[in-house]
Image (tube, helix red, strand yellow):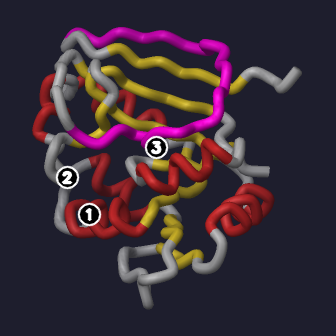
Amino acid sequence: MGKLIQWNLISLDGYFEGAQSWELDWHNYAWGDELEEFSLEQLGTAALLLFGRVTYEGMAAYWKKAEGNIAGLMNKLPKAVVSNSLKQADWNNTRLLSGEAIKSVTDLKRDVDGNIFVFGSGALSAALLGAGLFDEYRLAIVPIVLGTGTTLFGRKLPRVPMHIKEIRSFATGAVFLRYVPRPKE
């Protein structure tokens, strides 16, 4: 059974993108050799990458043209996109999941052996969090206050207590936090 993992960079005030869609220039405050190496380590454990439509389209547009070790893994790894509006998914090694998102991801977790990473995908992530499907949350807090932007999970979410599993700091000032949901009492 697959383990569903949310992995994202967020600002100190909780945004995963700035005021405009795909405004991610602030990631440079966290990026460096350490975070790149750490990202490669995580991608090396991925069995599948999962995206919502908007994130899929942005990631595909960027990574299909990018070069380097991370680009090689992003383009090689199996991917799935949850969408009822896309007619095809043309990024290498990508399958399209249409229909009800929670059922599709539940089935995906059952069928995939290994880590399934979700990057970005705010609306999808909120739905998956609400359904209790995430097994881990991996967040890198970027040392910046954006003041405005898009929150990762939106609002009106259920309360989900967490246990901390790992804390790591980087020379850039970014802090990585790895959480797992506490068992329901």
- Nearer to us in this view, 57 or 14: 14
Circle 3: residue type: Leu
Badge 1, how many Cα within 10 Å: few under 14, some, many 20+?
few
Numbered tag placed on residue 146 in the rendering: none
- Amino acid type, residue under disc 2 in the picture: Trp
Q: Which residue is mark 1?
A: 58
Question: In the depicted view, which residue is nearer to us: 30 or 84?
Answer: 84
Give residue 10's position: percent from left, percent from top. 32, 30
Q: CA distance from mark 1 to mark 3?
A: 18 Å
Name the outermost residue toward the bottom. 87
Residue appearing at x 29%, y 33% in the figure = 15
The mark nearer the N terminus, 1 or 3, is: 3
Q: Looking at the image, is mark 1 or mark 3 nearer the viewer? A: 1
**Which SS class for mark 2?**
loop
Q: To which residue does mark 2 refer?
A: 22
Q: Tell me whether circle 1 and circle 2 mark residues in contact (CB < 8 Å).
A: yes
Badge 3 local density, few (<14 within 10 Å), some, or many (20+)? some
